[in-house]
Amino acid sequence: GPAAAAADVRRARPWPAHPGRYAPLAGVRSFVRADRRTLVRDGLLVLLAVSVPFVAAGARLAGTAGVGWARDRHGVDLVPLLPLVWVVLLVVHTPLIFGTLAGLLLLEDRDGGVLPAVATTRASISTLLAYRLGATAGCTAVGLALGLAIAAADHAAGVAGLAAVVIAAAAVSAVPALLMAAFAANRVQGVA
């Protein structure tokens, strides 16, 4: 009867399906798929992600045509101010943008009731947080390195100085995400 059939199913497929074979990487893969779907559907998040190369192109324009225009039109030499432009437009902007993106994703998970569900799985909230902060640091490092290359930025210490700036910015990118997750009650407050 039905009871015997249910017993056969339990014997054939014990729960969990693969006891002892769970790896945190499996949880991270599912988080990546979910984040990719969320990012593609949300115009604000896409805008934040693509703002980095546009800002880098603006910094490049300011460092080339902008410097020439200021010199020719107003007799002002902006070349000594270019490092300040690079710091504000790239070094501050990039970790802030990617950190905000991670913070908004965390708030979206909280608003959608995903965090309690994740807490009951073997993937755990600590795996989600480690993945998000690691991905934020990685995206910041890649985005800033590309942004500095697009802007043709240089550093007094050469490539080693630029690498140190990229590493520091990647480490700092977690701050906006953690602040938003800690102090914003929902995504609307996070955006504000």
Image (cartoon, rainbow, N blue to C red):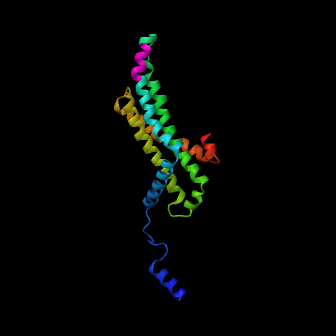
Picture coordinates of residue 79, whole percent (x, y) = 41, 18
Within the magenta stretch, is there residue 68? yes
Please determine whether, in this image, residue 34 is positioned above or below residue 11.
above
How many numbered marks are there? Answer: 0
Query: Going by the picture, which residue comes out furthest to the left?
Result: 159
Q: Work out whether residue 125 or residue 46 is closer to the camera in this orientation and state it.
A: 46
**51 vs 14, nearest the viewer:** 51
112 or 42: nearer the viewer = 42
x and y, in percent, of residue 85 in the image: 46, 25
Where's residue 72, x and y in %? 41, 12
Q: Is residue 189 left or right of residue 160?
A: right
When the figure is inspected, residue 112 is found, relative to residue 164, above or below; the finding is below
Residue for point 49% across, 50% down: 132
Image quarter for residue 117? Answer: bottom right
Q: Residue furthest bottom?
A: 1
Q: Is residue 83 above or below residue 184?
A: above
Q: Which residues are magenta?
A: 63-71
- Is residue 58 a member of the stretch shown in magenta? no
Can residue 106 be seen by looking at this rendering? yes
State the predominant SS element of the stretch in magenta.
helix
Q: Does any portion of residue 77 appear in the rendered image?
A: no
Side of 140 relative to 118 (left or right) = left
Question: Residue 10, position in %: x, y?
Answer: 49, 80
Q: Quadrant of residue 148?
A: top left
- At 43% from the left and 43% from the top, the residue drawn is 139
Task: Please tell me which residue is depicted at 51% across the width and 42% down the height of the picture.
Answer: 99
